[in-house]
Image (cartoon, rainbow, N blue to C red):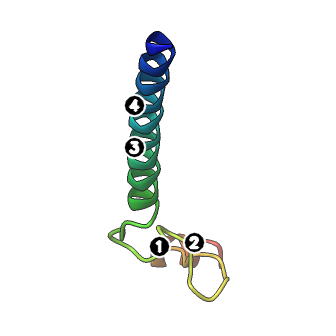
Amino acid sequence: MKKLLVLAGIAGVLFVLKRNKDAKSEADLWREATAPSETPLGSASTNGSAPAKSAQGASGQN
């Protein structure tokens, strides 16, 4: 009976440690995903249009 209690206690400790590790990993992923970048939304435009081309590239197509 004591052996079962010890095994259950060890299993409980391992379960708690695994949950804490998983929670930390998820928090790290969330922090990385929501971290501000140097340009807003990377290179995407905030109004849904395509990113503006450089002046040289746009004038070359006229």
Observer-side mark, 1 or 3, equals: 3
Q: Secondary structure at mark 1?
A: helix
| Neighbourhood count class around disc 4 (C-alpha, 10 Å): few under 14, some 14–19, many 20 upward | few
Mark number, residue 20: 3
Mark 3 crowdedness (10 Å alpha carbons): few <14, some 14-19, many ≥20:
few
Q: CA distance from mark 1 to mark 4?
A: 63 Å
Taking depth in this image into account, of 10 and 44 the one nearest to the observer is: 10
32 is higher (above) or lower (below) than 18? below
What SS does tag 2 mark? Answer: helix
Q: Upstream in the sequence, badge 4 or badge 3? A: 4
Q: Earlier in the sequence, mark 1 or mark 4?
A: 4
Disc on res. 3: none
Rendered location of residue 10, percent (x, y): 41, 22
Say what secondary structure mark 4 lies in.
helix
- Amino acid at circle 3: Asn
Looking at the rendered structure, the kind of residue marked 2 is Gly
| Residue at which label 2 appears | 60
For marks 4 and 2, the one nearer the N-term is: 4
Q: Mark 4 highlights which residue?
A: 13
What is the x, y in percent for residue 19?
46, 41
Q: Which mark is in front, 4 or 3?
A: 4
Amino acid type, label 1: Gln
Q: Which of 26/48 is in front? A: 26
Depth check: 58 or 41 in front?
Answer: 41
**Amino acid under label 4?**
Val
* CA separation in Å, label 1 and label 2: 6 Å
Where is mark 1, residue-wise? 56
Residue 48: x and y in percent read 67, 83
